[in-house]
Image (spheres, rainbow, N blue to C red):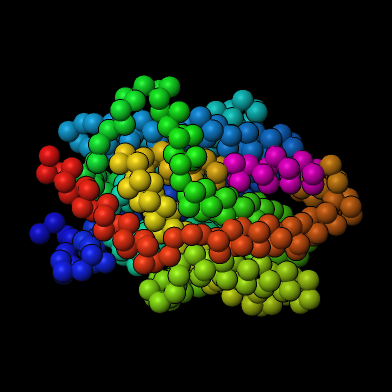
């Protein structure tokens, strides 16, 4: 009746798993969140630099600094949502508040009511977007991490969430393609307006399905330190220091994200100014997204047969190798060759995206069982904080570095020639910048200390503990 099906009770390895109705109702909110990823990582910076009249270095600095805002917002949101006790649950009130903030930020960023933007305008607009995302994502991901399941069950449910996010990302990539087909600029006002309207319409609907269709896991007990802001910030460090598996997962995800986002942040510039294939930006993203979604069932199936952390490590190294070899040895300026490289790279690099939430959930279960305290929000905030800091790296380091080397996209828009040294720097970073970083992150994932058998034992003990707490 409640959308969850119990497995046979005779085996400790078998626990209640989320049914398809619950998994879908939970995962659908990731779809509009996925719609935001391409614009925030590549389209918005290009739009404000080329169309809204802001210097590239200023755009990069503001975009990067906004990520560090999460240093405060994410831990507070996570730890305080852990301590929230209302008749509507711990996570729902935070998600509802985040919706209102995000809607205003999307309007100002995607559909700016001005023709040119000042640094202050850009900073405020981004601040609202990232604040809304924090208020939604941290409780949302904590909600999913706490739902019971075996390692495969977690991979299946959280993998579905990520697949829906990839579908959102893929459809988001169609906005530049549609704009180009209609004769507009691929990251101009028209493309961003299409995305903005989609986010404003879909996000509240998906949030309603989550809040009315999925129950929250019962809390174990509240931290004896209470609900104060100071205690919430202290809990941020307590959780990190006391959970070695989580530290390993956090470091691996952080480093892999730096590599992935480094390429994503400059991919539009690379396709436009190195390959002279601006119209392929949307095509590549769409093709890669389709292949990633199509390959998702394979990776979820493999997670049942192999250790999840090792799958992530192998897939990440393979993706790095495909990118470097393809872009350095093949005539990548030809559209079909470009697709022939991007498609297999997307198929293997979807594995970290789909499977890392399951590794995170295993580490969270480990910490909750050992401490007896629910800290899923705090743990998730740490992951999102690390992801935000990783996403700041391209904007704070790569964009200013490209500007220093002489790369200025506004010159090309005005009909001038970009400095050859700037183009050389862009090409070098585009081909070789991400791979070494990704390989280091993959090696960290390979060292994750919890295997599937241990994860089942931890999860079974935690399910029993939560059942006792719920009975009280």
Q: Is residue 401 magenta?
A: yes
Q: Residue at x 59, y 41 (%)?
A: 389
Q: Residue at x 61, y 62 (%)?
A: 443
Query: Does 395 sit left or right of 157 as displayed?
Result: right
Query: Does 51 sit left or right of 99 as displayed?
Result: right
Instruction: Farthest residue to the right: give it.
Output: 420
Where, quadrant-wise, is the N terminus in this rendering? bottom left
Task: Decide which of 86, 124 is in the foreground and name it.
Answer: 86
Q: Is residue 436 magenta?
A: no
- Location of residue 161 in the rendering, given as x and y in whole percent from the top left corner: 37, 58
Q: Residue at x 36, y 67 (%)?
A: 453
- Relative height, residue 109 to residue 276 (above, below): above
Q: Residue at x 51, y 62 (%)?
A: 352
Q: Is residue 128 visible?
A: no
Figure label count: 0
Q: Main secondary structure of the magenta part?
A: helix
Query: Does 185 sit left or right of 330 as displayed?
Result: left
- Location of residue 22 in the rendering, given as x and y in whole percent from the top left corner: 23, 58
Segment tinted magenta in the rendering: 389-403
- Location of residue 472 in the rendering, given as x and y in whole percent from the top left corner: 12, 39
- Location of residue 362 in the rendering, given as x and y in whole percent from the top left corner: 39, 56
Q: Which quarter of the figure has residue 425?
A: bottom right
- Relative height, residue 67 to residue 248 (above, below): above
Task: Decide which of 107, 427 is in the foreground and name it.
Answer: 427
Q: Is residue 467 visible?
A: yes
């Amino acid at each position: 009746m409640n959308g969850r099906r119990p497995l046979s009770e005779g085996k400790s390895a078998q626990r209640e798993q989320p049914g398809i109705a619950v998994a879908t109702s939970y995962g659908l909110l990731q779809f509009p969140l996925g719609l935001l990823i391409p614009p925030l990582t590549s389209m918005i910076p290009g739009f404000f630099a080329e169309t809204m009249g802001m210097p590239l270095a200023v755009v990069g600095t503001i975009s990067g600094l906004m990520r560090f805002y999460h240093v405060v917002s994410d831990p507070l949101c996570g730890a305080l949502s852990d301590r929230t006790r209302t008749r509507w649950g711990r996570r729902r009130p935070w998600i509802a508040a985040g919706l209102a903030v995000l809607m205003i930020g999307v309007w100002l960023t995607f559909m700016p009511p001005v023709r040119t933007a000042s640094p202050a305008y850009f900073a405020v607009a981004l601040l609202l977007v990232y604040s809304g995302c924090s208020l939604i994502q941290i409780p949302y991901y904590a909600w999913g991490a706490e739902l019971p399941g075996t390692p495969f069950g977690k991979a299946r449910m959280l993998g579905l969430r990520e697949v829906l996010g990839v579908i959102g990302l893929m459809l988001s990539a169609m906005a530049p393609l549609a704009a180009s087909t209609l004769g507009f600029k691929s990251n101009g006002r028209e493309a961003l307006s299409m995305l903005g309207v989609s986010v404003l319409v879909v996000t509240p609907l998906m949030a309603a399905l989550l809040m009315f269709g999925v129950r929250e896991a019962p809390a174990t007990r509240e931290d004896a330190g209470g609900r104060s802001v100071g205690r919430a910030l202290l809990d941020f460090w307590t959780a990190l220091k006391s959970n070695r598996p989580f530290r390993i997962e956090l470091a691996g995800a952080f480093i892999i994200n730096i590599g992935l986002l480094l390429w994503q942040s400059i991919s539009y510039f690379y396709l436009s100014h190195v390959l002279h294939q601006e119209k392929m930006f949307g095509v590549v993203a769409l093709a890669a997204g389709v292949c990633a979604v199509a390959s998702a069932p394979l990776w979820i199936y493999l997670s049942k047969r192999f250790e999840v952390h090792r799958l992530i490590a192998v897939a990440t190294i393979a993706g790095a190798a495909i990118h470097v070899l393809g872009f350095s040895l093949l005539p990548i300026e030809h559209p079909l060759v470009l697709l022939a490289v991007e498609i297999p790279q997307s198929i293997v690099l979807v594995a970290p995206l789909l499977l890392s939430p399951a590794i995170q959930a295993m580490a969270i279960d480990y910490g909750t069982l050992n401490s007896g305290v629910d800290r899923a929000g705090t743990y998730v905030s740490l992951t999102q904080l690390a992801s935000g800091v990783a996403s700041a790296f391209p904007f704070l380091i790569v964009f200013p570095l490209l500007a220093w080397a002489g790369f200025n996209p506004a010159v090309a828009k005005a009909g001038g020639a970009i400095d050859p040294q700037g183009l050389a720097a862009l090409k070098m970073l585009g081909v070789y910048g991400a791979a070494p970083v990704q390989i280091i992150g993959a090696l960290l994932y390979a060292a994750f200390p919890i295997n599937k058998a241990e994860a089942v034992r931890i999860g079974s003990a935690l399910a029993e503990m939560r059942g006792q707490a719920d009975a009280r």
